Amino acid sequence: MSLLKDKVCIVTGAARGIGAAIVKKFAESGAHVAFTYVSDSSADKAAALENELSNLGVQVKAYKSNASDFAQCETLVNDVVKEFGKVDVCVNNAGISKDNLLLRLTEDQWSQVIDVNLNSVYNMTKQVVRPMMKAKSGSIINMSSIIGIRGNAGQSSYAASKAGIIGFTKSIAIELGSRNIRCNAIAPGFIETDMTHYLKEGTVGENFLKDIPLGRFGKAEEVANLSLFLASDLSAYITGEVISICGGLSI
């Protein structure tokens, strides 16, 4: 299936987890993919992902780039346009959590989460808009969270950042709709990744599962499937939406 044949996609924070699953799904669907990682410890995983997808007949390239740094985002997008020729899709997936009750949450922890989760979306969107406007086409996909919709104790910084993404997404959809550029948000629930592995342990995991009608945590590939839909022309008349993928947790 080649839903993204010859499209050029950027995926941030994609050396592992949901980001890596999106890179794989896009490449398998015919897209050329540039993806980012930020830490030296992720370099081997990024290289392994490149190698894994090298036989698909598409171009896949990893870039070390910090999405929370405006200048690095500008350099990244310029390099991708130079290397790949255009940008059709941008998935703003980079994210972290620094969970803590408000009384214990430090200013530095708050700022880190806002910088990586929310400011990065502004940084990247600001840069990809120009080539997309030139092409009069584009799909921007922002990774929010069910926590940005319903909140959660001990996750005020994470919830604030993910809620901010929703407001940003809706505003950009209105701004850029006349240019045939779509902007949507995905709000995953509890997905099995390195970031959430501890949530499955003991009574904590059992309590979360009780609130999920489908009775299980989601898989990264399932989020990638939704990302594929929003990146492709199958969703050509969808913009400004927030689509939850949470097993019914938001009901």
Image (cartoon, helix red, strand yellow):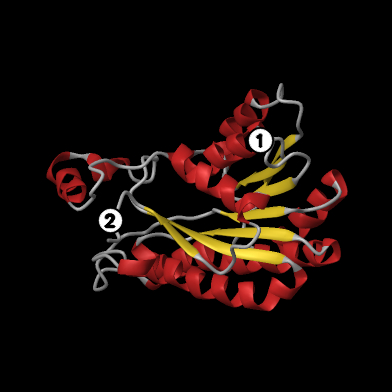
Circle 2: residue type:
Leu
Q: Secondary structure at mark 2?
A: loop
In the rendered view, tell whether residue 54 sits above or below residue 230. Answer: above
Can you say which quadrant of the picture contains the N terminus? top right
Q: Amino acid at mark 1?
A: Ser
Which numbered circle lies on residue 167? none
Q: Position of residue 38 (x, y in %)?
A: 59, 48
Relative side of 178 to 191, left or right: right
Residue 125 vertical placement versus 225 (above, below): below
Residue projecting furthest to the left:
203
Task: Rate crowding at label 1 as few (under 14), some (14 to 19) or many (20 or more) other CA atoms within 10 Å.
Answer: many
The residue lying toward the viewer, choosing from 176 and 204, is: 176
Q: Nearer the viewer, residue 85 or 183?
A: 183
Position of 235 compared to 128: left or right? left
Whole-percent x, y for residue 204 in the image: 17, 47
Q: Position of residue 226 (x, y in %)?
A: 51, 48
Task: Describe residue 205's horizontal placement relative to residue 89 as left or right.
Answer: left
Q: Quadrant of residue 55?
A: top right
Q: Residue at x 63, y 77 (%)?
A: 174
Residue 249 is marked as: 2
Q: On the image, numbered disc 1 is attached to which residue?
A: 29
The quarter of the displayed image where residue 219 is located: top left
Marks 1/2: CA–CA distance: 29 Å
Helix, strand or loop at label 1? It is loop
